[in-house]
Amino acid sequence: MTIFNPNDPTTRRGIEKAAALLEQSRAPVVVVNRIDLAGAAAAVTLARQAGAVLDHVAPTGLGPSQEQGTLGTVPGEAFLRADLVIVAGPITDTLAHDAGFARLTAPSPTRTVVNLGSAETTGGLLSSAEELRLDGLGLAEQLGVLYALAQGRPVSLDDRQAAEATRFIEQRMSQAKYGVFVFAPDAIDEHAQFMMMSLANVLSVETRWSILPLGRPAGQAELIRMCQALTGLPPPLSFAGTRPVHDPLLYRAVDVIGRRETDAILWVSACEDVPPDWIGGAPLAAVTARADAILAASAQISIGKPGIDYPALSEGALTGVVTANAQTSPVSKASAAQVIEAIGQQFAASQNGAVA
Amino acid sequence: MSLMCIAGGRIVDPASGRDEIGDVWIQNGRIVDAPDGHPPAERIDASGCVVMAGAIDIHTHVVGANVAAARLLLPERYSEIETPPEHWTGAPFDLQTTGALYAQMGFTMVVEPAVAPVDAAATHAELELIPYVDRAALSVVGNDDVLLGMLRDKASEDAIADYVGWLMTTSRAIGAKTINPGGVAALKENIRSFELDDTIPEYGVSSRQISAAMRKALTKLGVPHPLHLHTHNLGLPGSVETAVATIEAAEGEPLHLAHLQFYAYGTEGGFGMSSGAVRLAELLSKNKNVTADVGQVMFGPTCTISSDTLTQFNARRWATPKKWAVRDGDANGGGMVPFHYKARSKIAALQWAIGLELFLAIDDPNQVYMTTDHPNGGPFTSYPDLIAQLMDRSVRQAVIDQLPKEALEVSALGSMTREYSLRDIAVMTRQAPARLLGLDDRGHLKPGAAADVSVYRENPDIAAMFRKAQHVTKDGAFIVRDGQLAPPSYSRTLSVAPDYDKAIVSHVGDAYDRRWGLPPETFNVPETLMRNSSPFEVVACRS
């Protein structure tokens, strides 16, 4: 059983301050980082209660998949079946530390790994990988060239590169039995993602190609799932009106804060991360598993880490789905949901008092 | 809870043989006999009303990873919704709205029919957010490497039953569903069509073998709900042959066919598609071991959501608007393809007609269940319109008059005069679904039943009558009263926990280790991680 004492004086003060900050705000923003499913549900409920904008700290990057067809796969299938893996774009820290990525790109007698882009982008992490690079072109353009060639369309490339790309399409990609594009969704732009999906689709007319985003920002899947379950819509969301509104152009937290359209920020992060630089310019309250003080925060309430300090449902890198994670630490700490719900209760109590 | 009487309504309860003006008594959340001389603490005047047990939807896609993906695909559609029931745009409702809309129509239980076992924890976390109604889920089994490997290795029937029992127990399912058996696994090997006796190259196992193994496993486990089968060739002209072969392959064993309408297509007529509904109805009348839900098509936009990735992969070309998502998954995966059933389309018109033909041609309402395969054929909020079309020939004739004539020329619907009675509706939407799921205390109003009661004010506009119940009780408490929703309350998720040999877990563990490097416990659904206290209730298996 998780230990949570909302009447602990330090916790109480933090909860009251955070609730007061939201209550006094005309345009609050709730920014979520790592979170478990219950914490995400609580964050959605609190944002609705406070009429806030709600978003994940990392842009969700859903644009391309909402605009065209997408063929996807999951880490388990890719690991068992993929004979050709193309790592598209840079290997971010998150991707490099993703357990599913490590398994999929490890040397294997049945699988070839190719880095599409440039050696610099891999940071030397894929020493066993082959490389395909079309000089002078960005990732989106390289994918675009392959897409055009896969459809038999002419491309404007020098003969050597055109021959190399054509050979790669004909002898490698078209011959793959189960090809997978792997990428970090927060590391490549939407244009590149769009071209990658298009390429997977056109190759799949004859064989099987899928895309597999890995190293997704922690907590994003949980927040999207609960946002949608509770409102029908993914983040970013504004609860300022009578109905929640999803508008990725208007309500991305980074933009709302950057445009100084907020007067209060609640940072929710069930890990050690500090808020990114763009979070500022307005009073800040933090619900965080970070032990050290976040200097900019006027209120800070301590929580544990899901699956470590308290049992939780959260996404696993190896599975790509939300599963149950038992507590591993001998000492229990408050869960994100407990603290966020306590802020919500305090918020409601203050509002009722104001009405009375 | 104090004694309550719903008094003076027309009680339509086929299980007790009642179709009469009378009373229904409730105490402590249960239906009770009329007490001698005890006045009720509360008397609800039901004169001018029809009183039935709460309705049960046995096949409605309301939660899970695929529904979440559909929401992600169509956020602009959801934003268009102002008043959801009247303005369905194809994007799945949020869960609060889902529960509220079901309750308002007099439903007290819904079954999510396609839970991927690996996603069961998240799915149950969503399911329990649906207010007002009981919930249940079917586990998807049949394209997973563990089962296919066991069949390839000629594992014993007992071992397969143990595996299925373990999977259902850990994923907290009330039944098991097999979706395009073998076909989904074959797609991963780039096979684009799959028939009953085709084999998956990697395993050498056929669809027929998979279905037979699953039927036997469920019988052995004593799971009340028979295999819930989504067979192959869904939606294709000529699929009636697949349905016929599937029914015959059951060899008299219990079988439930999901959304049969999508398999009732012949190949005759000017546009290469015709109705096979009457043929299937005749076959069902001879095979009482088989039940079916219809998956009725209703006109309008929707988003098809299915774990039949083979079908959805092939259907992606018809996406409207031109976006879709198909994902291989651990076992089945999912495909989300938006679609618009237009009344002016010959094919959509014929699909609508075929669904109604099935309802009207299958004599026994215990064998046929009202579903739209929400949202695949249309939203569940169209049930009142569907009931009106079944109960009133003039209502469906008004629809027929708007449709392309070519569609009706290859359908028998125009010549069908049958009109459903209230008793038929009560059997199809209450009694039969409860029996199919093994719920002895639901679907009827006999003493001892859960006090799940729907009260509808009689109205010549049948759709209006069934769209907004006057009163609905769940376990004796009002969830709708005088047409108004009560504040949200949360009921239970029902599941089975069959006996199985725990030794199977080590075999499963090896397979899970190969796939993920993780133990099978990773995929458990712990009650302690659910939001509500005591969210689960176990339904007894047959001994």
Image (cartoon, coloured by chain):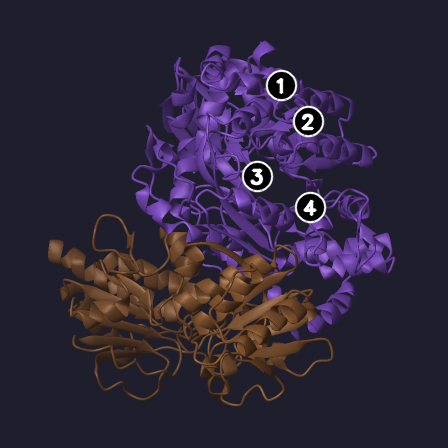
Q: First in sequence: mark 3 or mark 2?
A: 3
Q: What residue sits right under mark 1 in the picture?
A: B410
Callouts 1 and 3 in the same chain = yes
Binning the other alpha carbons within 10 Å of mark 1 as few (below 14), some (14 to 19) or many (20 upward) gives many
Q: Any mark on residue B266, and which?
A: 2
Chain identity of mark 2: B
Q: First in sequence: mark 2 or mark 4?
A: 4
Q: Which chain is purple?
A: B
Give the structural element (helix, strand or loop) at label 4: loop
The image position of residue B103, as x and y in percent, is: 42, 36
Binning the other alpha carbons within 10 Å of mark 2 as few (below 14), some (14 to 19) or many (20 upward) gives many
Q: What residue sits right under mark 3 in the picture?
A: B59
Q: Residue at x 40, y 66 (%)?
A: A191
Quote the CA–CA distance across marks 3 and 2: 24 Å
Quote the CA–CA distance across marks 4 and 1: 27 Å
Q: What residue sits right under mark 4 in the picture?
A: B180
* CB contact under 8 Å: marks 2 and 4: no
